[in-house]
Every structure is written in C-alpha cells, then in structure tokens.
Image: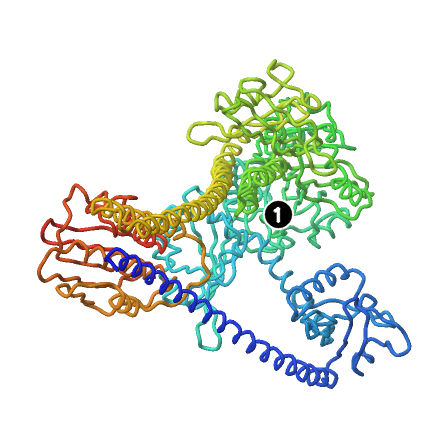
Amino acid sequence: MNQNKIDILQRDLKKEKIARKAAEKVVENKSNDLFLLEELKKRNLELENLLEQKSSQLEGVFENINDAYILMDMSGNILKMNDIAIAFFGYNIEKEKLNVCDLIYHEDLEYGSKSFVTLKEEGLFTNYRTRVLTKDKQVKWVQINGNLIVDKENKPTGAQGIIRDITSEKRAEDLLNESENRLSSLIKNLDSAVLLEDENRKIILTNNKFCELFNIPISPDLLKGEDCATAANDSKILFKQPKEFISGVTSLLEKKQQVLGDELIMADGEILERDFIPILNGSVYKGHLWTYKNITLREKYRESLEAEKENYSNIIANMNLGIVELNTNDEILLVNQSFAQMCGYSQKELLGKKAKDVFELLNEADPTKIEMDKLGKRESNSYELKIKNKSGAIRNLLVSRTPNFNINGEVIGYVRIYLDVTEARENANLIQEKKEELDIIVHNSSIGIALTRHGRIIKTNAALQNMLGFSEEELNTFAIKDLSFAEDSPSFKKYINQITLDKINNFTFTKRYKKKDGTIIWTKTDVNVVRDKDRNIKHQVTFIEDITSHREKTLIIDLINNLTKSILGKTDIIEIAWEIVNNIAAYLDTDDCVIYLVDHEKETTEQIAVYGAKLNNDSQIINKLYLPKGKGIVGSVAKSGKSQLINDTSKDDRYVIDEERRFSEITVPIMSNGIAIGIIDSEHKDKNHYTQEHIKTLESIAGLAAIKLRTAISIREHKKVEIRNEQLLKKLEESNNELNEYAHVVSHDLKSPLRSIDALVSWIKTDNADLLNGNTLQNFNLIEDTLEKMELLISDILYYSSIDAITSKKSNVNLNSVVEDLQKILFIPKNISVQILNKLPVVRGEKTKFQQLFQNLISNAIKFNDKDKGLIQIDVLENKSFYQFSVKDNGIGIESRYLDKVFKFFHSLKPSKESSGIGLSIVKKIVELYQGKIWIESEPKIGTTFYFTLKK
C-alpha cells in the first residue's frame, strides 16, 4: 500500500473517531436527560402527597381559629363557614344558599371584584379591608387574609379567608384622622406664620403663611424633616439688617428663653412681629416654636394716626371747642386749653380727674342721653348741659361724645367735645361757624367719608372724591348702590337688615366700588348709623379705606403659591396649561382665559387649554382656534414677544371674535431664550378691566410657566426620539436574526458540496493511484488542503455570526480551569511555556465562549513565536467594576501600522492553512458581548500583549 492510500485511510480514521466521540456524547447527554426525568417524576409524586397532607392539616387549623373563616368555590359560592363566621354574618349555609357578593357592601363591590382578580393572579392577598353587610343589614368593617386552593394539577378550585372585625378600630381611626386633619388645616391656614422645630432644629410643622412670608415656593408638608441649621443665613437677605437678624436668631437659640413681640423690618419694608417660645418637657429641652405676624398695616395705621394727631394738635389746642379724652373708667387722659378755660381748672389739675366731678350740674338734661354716656355705649351721643364751673360762672355747654377705638375695633375710651353755647344761643352764626370747623376736620381726613340718608349720598369728603375720581357734585347725584357691584349686595344686605331691625348700629365690610374711569377699588368699609331719640335712622356715616394694593399683593402671592403647588411635578404640556388657566382666571376675576402653544415651524398658535364657555361636558375645547403668527392680538404677541393690554377691543381692528366680543383683553407671551413658546390670553366683558399690575403679574407667571413648558416640550420630544429608537432597534434585531439565519443556511449549503468535492478527490486518487504522477498528486493534496481551509473558514464565519445569540447557558465559569484544559488539548511545542501569573477569577457567562476567547489568543501567541525559548504569560488585574486580562508573548511582534487592522474580518498578518483570518475578530466580538474592551501593545521582534476587560 503506497503512502497516498495510507494518508487517505488515516484521514478517514481521524474523521470516524471524531464522529464516534460526538455520537457517544449525544448518547451520554440523552441518558442523563432520561435519568433526570425519572427523578423529577418521583419528586413530583412525593410533593403531591405532601401537598394533600398539608392541605388537610391547614383546613383543620382554619376551621378552629378564633376569627371568622369562610371557604368558597371559584364562583364565589360559600361552601363552609366556621361558628364565628356564622355568628358574625348571621347566615346558615346549610339552610340557605349564600354567595360572597351577598356579604360585600354594595359600594365596595367593584373594589372586591378587583381584589378577587388579584387573588386569582397572585394566589393570595393580605390585609384587604372592606365593608360587609350582615344578614340583619348591619354595615361592618373587616380585614381579610385569603389564599387560593388548588388541585393536584395546580388549578384553582376555590378560596378561603380569615375575617377579622375591625369596625371599632376603623371608627376610632376615622375620628383620629378627622381631628388631625382639622388641626392641620387650622394651623396651615392661620394668619400667623408658624414654624415648629425639634431640639436638633429639624422642622416638625409649618404652615402656608410661613412659606408665603419667606418666599418658599413649596407646600408646608414638603418641609417636614428639613434641617433649619442654616435657615437664618439663607433668609437674611429678606431683612433690612441681615447681620442683626442672624445674631438675634443665634442669641435666642443660645438663651432658650421666651421672647414675645420682637419686631423685624424686612427688606421690602414689611414689618413682622416675632415670638420665640422654647418647649420643655420638665427640664428637658424638646425644641421651640417661632411665630411671625405681619403687622405692617397696623404699624402704618398707628404711624398715620400719630401723624394725624400731630397735624391737628395745634388746631385742637387753639380751638374754641373743649376737647376731653377719657378712658373707660371716666378718667381724663387729655384736655385742651379751651376745656381748661371752660371749667376753670388748669390742664395739670384735670389729668386723672373723673369727668363727672369737673362741673356742677344746674339743669335737668335729657336723662336717657346722660345715662348712655355714663354706661359707655358704643354709639355716638350728644346733649346740652347747664353748669357752674370752678370760678362760679354759669355756662351753657353743648356736649358731643364718641367712642375711641383701637386698631382691632375695641373701645378703649371716649372723646367728648364741649361747645360753650352761652353766647351762641343768641348768635346762630357762631353755631354755624363751629359746625364748619367740624366739617374741616372731616374734610381733611385721610380716610374717605360719606354721609348718606336712605342710601342716597348727601355729603362726601375730599379723600373719598379723590379715591373714586368723582367731584362732590357728581357724587351727590348717586346712591351707594350706583357705585357698588350687584354681586356684593346679598352679603351687604344682611347687615343693612340688622341695622333696620335696630340690632346693630355699625359694621365693617370688605367691598368693591366703581371708579369714574371704569376701574374698581377694594375697600374696607365701616358703616355707622346715627339715630334720633325715637331710634329711627337719621343718616349713616360711612368710612371707606382703600385696600386695593394690599389685596392685590395678597392675591399675587396666593396665585404664585397655588400655581407653583399645582404644576409641581407635572411634565405634560396640556396638564400644565390647564393648571395655569384655572389659577389665572380666578386671579383676573374673569370667565375667559386661554393658553396658546406656538408652533414656529408651522408659524401658528394653537389653543391647548381654556377656562370658560368653550369647554363641553367632557372638558374638550369647542371649535379649537388656530391663529397664524402675526394675526390677531394673540398672533401679534407671538410674533413680537411683547405683552399687550387692550382697554377697548372695539377700537382695535386686530381683535378676533372667538365666541362673543369682550371689550378688555390682556395678552402676555411665555418666553424661552428670547422666543415666544406660548401665549397667556384673557378677555373680560367690561372695558378697562385689566391694569398694568395685571401685566406685571402675568409676566411673572409666564416666567414660571416657561420653565415648566420648556421642560415638558423637551420631555415630549425626548419621548418621540425614544419611540423612533425603539422602532430602529426592533428593525435591527429583526435584521440580525435574519442575518444569523442566513449564515446558518449558507454555511450548511456550502459545507455539503465541499464534503462532496473532498470525497470525489479522494475517490479519484484511490481509483487512479497508478496513473497519477507526483505533480498531479501534489495538486490533489493542495485541493484537499484548500477544502479543509474552506470548511474551517465557513465554521468560523458561522461561529462569529452566532456569538451574540441569546443563550440560557450562563453559569459561573472558573477561568483557571478553562486555561488549564486548553493547555491539555492544544499543541504547544516543547520550546514554548505558558505561565499564569495570578489566579484567574470566576466569571459569569457561557463557558464555550470563554474557551474560544483564550484558545484563539493562546494559539495566536504559539503560532507567531519564533524564539528558541518561547514564553506566553497570562495575567489579571481586578478593578472595582471589571477584570483586566492580558496575554503576553515574546514572539515576532506586530508593526504599528498593522495594529488597527488585526481585528478586522478575514485579516491575517501571516496566512496559513490553519488560519481563517477570523480568529481575532471572534475574540473582539466575545469581549464586546461581555461589555468589555480589547487592545494591543506590540513591538516587532520583541513580542505582543493583548489586553482585554470583562465586566463583573
């Protein structure tokens, strides 16, 4: 037998051995699978028996517990109840059919159905609370723990539950929650700011007023647990004297002593009254309470009174009217020179003296009026006296008395005005002169005053005329109702009815008045009634104080706070826009408010949220309006980015009628990076409804809205991109699957003809062994070598395409064992040694892929080593999140110009029949599959080091 036949037989024998080993491996795996299947059947039978045993035991336990127990089928029919359940519900299922729906309170049936679905999906539920209905129609609260009952095939056949009566607990819980809610609501809505801190300066409780005073744009509930250690330093800029504010807080915290009525002046001029109250449990310090109250109005009122008093002190001192100020004990606090001359005493002698001891009465004045004066009634009063003074002179005095109130409306004393009418009785002109002097005092008052009779205006002072913009003559043609709003009348009339019934003589009311220019003012109106001796109403004196600016400031703060709370955490454009229109409509006192979104690509504005009649019953916008940029007032603002206030839309040809014409319009852009992204637009049926103050407020709101809308728009665009990315990833995944499938098909279709060609070449060589010369046989050998290389190439391509395929064979892989096994199966020449410098780790993954990774790198190092003593060193460094491996050799090395090509497909620096040129491509793909990186360091004739990482 010649050498060619021997080579053919050896090659066939080698293939047969490989095929036999593969077949033996398949048989071994199948045997193992059969053995495991038999073991599983045995274990399953044991588990079923154990389950039946445990189910019987559990059923006995449930029936004998101290709580109510029921058993039902999957349709809800009650199959069994223990004695406690029978007593609790009042049903006897042996005599009457009962379904679980009969036991659930009708309002909780939907909740019960959802819970039953949960039970079927998860197999149990715990602490399920609901109301139930007993046979005698009692509603009770219960807590239920239940689970499914399944058969041997794990199919649900019924359910059982333990029921505990929690009616009394629920009632107590509801009462406690109600009390806590009331207390919390009371504190949150106090007019004083409250801050309660523990001993470590952690916030326990605060309220809305505190957040308002200190410009905190979040809910008080979100402040709980916050550390106040640096709060004073953070808030110092709010105060006129920041350093003094910080030192004051530090001193109070160090001394831990109660301080009340401490005044602070804020940077904007507001005045606060601060209280500091330490909280002690016995002698143990548990924290402290801060309270802040805005007393700006009170202080300004006091300063105003002092100024008025100073202005008129000289006039009063030199008047011919005697003026006496008394406390509630009838003791004289203040007198002027005229009164001292009337009574014959000096001013010093009169101070502290009882008023009744100053004169000797000579006549019988109206006893009713004198008695009213003595009793200190709140009504004004006047009468005439004939007296003898200290020097014995007899004089006729006209006395007028009025109560003196503090800022809280409490009577703190009285003022009496004495007019010596001894000569005036004979001189009517003198009386008229004194009356005019009194009119001057009224006319020059800083508070508006109106004298009315039966609702008609008789007289007004300058302050009221300036306040409303009408002249005295114009006001004298009006009734009070002509200046008022019909909406305010119901609340106002209830006080008028009480006055008519003689139940009250004065009241204070907050109401609106119309100004001559069409605008409105908010006032604090104090109405006082003057009656005749028969208690009939003669006229009314009304004091009117303009509080518009104070109310506007309060409304703005409330608007910003409410809007901030309502849009906090929202990211949807439409939701944010709805919150904005709802809050702004209330502030502007209008029933028409709209948010537009500007589309700069389409050059249009679109209504996205409305307040008013444009909503249908489903809260959808009726006839949604789209306006081109530049058209209408809204479109003009979208184009210019500047706010517009229109007092009369009938004079503006840009006005676009949506539903009906409204005569006032205010339009403010929502700006972002100098571009209008939205528009706030509001209209009102009356002319001149909006003010420049409204413009400023809406521009502030627009700034706040811009931040939220910009974020919402970004999120919306981001979601669109995510959807597109998901679609692309899905298409990519489908393409990869198709490519993998194609690679398998192609590799199979290519290998079949290769094997046929190999067999044909072998037969030709065998059949013509005596006819073929040496060159021909060498060519046939080249053909066989080429076929082997092609088969290797196809196998490597197939392996490369399937590397990133999803596998379920991940396990813990000891890389030391992997490398040791490779050293046994790889052909390693005697002149080359392999060293593992550090113990290799255990990693998570597919063992065959790690084998392929190290096999290719080690084979590469062997293949390209030209040294008499070759050396391959494998090492590892552990990092926090990954392992860094290296495979180093002292072989031929790689020139720098080839370093970026070695991982490319079909690229081999030294072609050979054993190499397909894909080995390092496979290595790179495996490393990247495990989220790692691979790189090379090499020097020609010195050696090469492959570095790669594997994520932990």
Q: Residue furthest right?
A: 95
Name the residue located 57 percent from the left edge and 17 percent from the top edge. 631
Q: State whether residue 888 is above or below residue 637.
A: below
Q: State whether residue 494 is above or below residue 165.
A: above
Any part of residue 310 in sight? no
Residue 702: x %, y % from top left = 51, 34
Is 501 on the left or on the right of 375, as rendered?
Answer: right
Residue 455: x %, y % from top left = 76, 32
Q: Write down the residue under mark 1.
A: 404
Q: Nearer the viewer, residue 605 or 947?
A: 947
Q: Nearer the viewer, residue 936 or 149?
A: 936
Residue 564: x %, y % from top left = 53, 44
Is 797 on the left or on the right of 517, as rendered?
Answer: left
Name the residue located 66 percent from the left edge and 40 percent from the top edge. 510
Q: Quadrant of residue 174?
A: bottom right
* Residue count near mark 1 (Cα–Cα under 10 Å), binned few <14, some 14–19, many ≥20: some
Is 155 on the left or on the right of 812, as rendered?
Answer: right
Q: How is the image coloured?
A: rainbow
Q: Nearer the viewer, residue 201 or 553?
A: 201
**The C terminus sits in image quarter:** bottom left
Q: State whether residue 160 is above or below residue 663.
A: below
Residue 892: x %, y % from top left = 12, 52
Q: Quadrant of residue 523?
A: top right
Q: Nearer the viewer, residue 936 or 168?
A: 936
Q: Residue furthest front?
A: 770
Q: Give, as a three-letter code, the residue at label 1.
A: Asn
How many numbered discs, if any?
Answer: 1
Any part of residue 204 in sight? yes
**The N terminus sits in image quarter:** bottom left
- The secondary structure type at the circle numbered 1 is strand
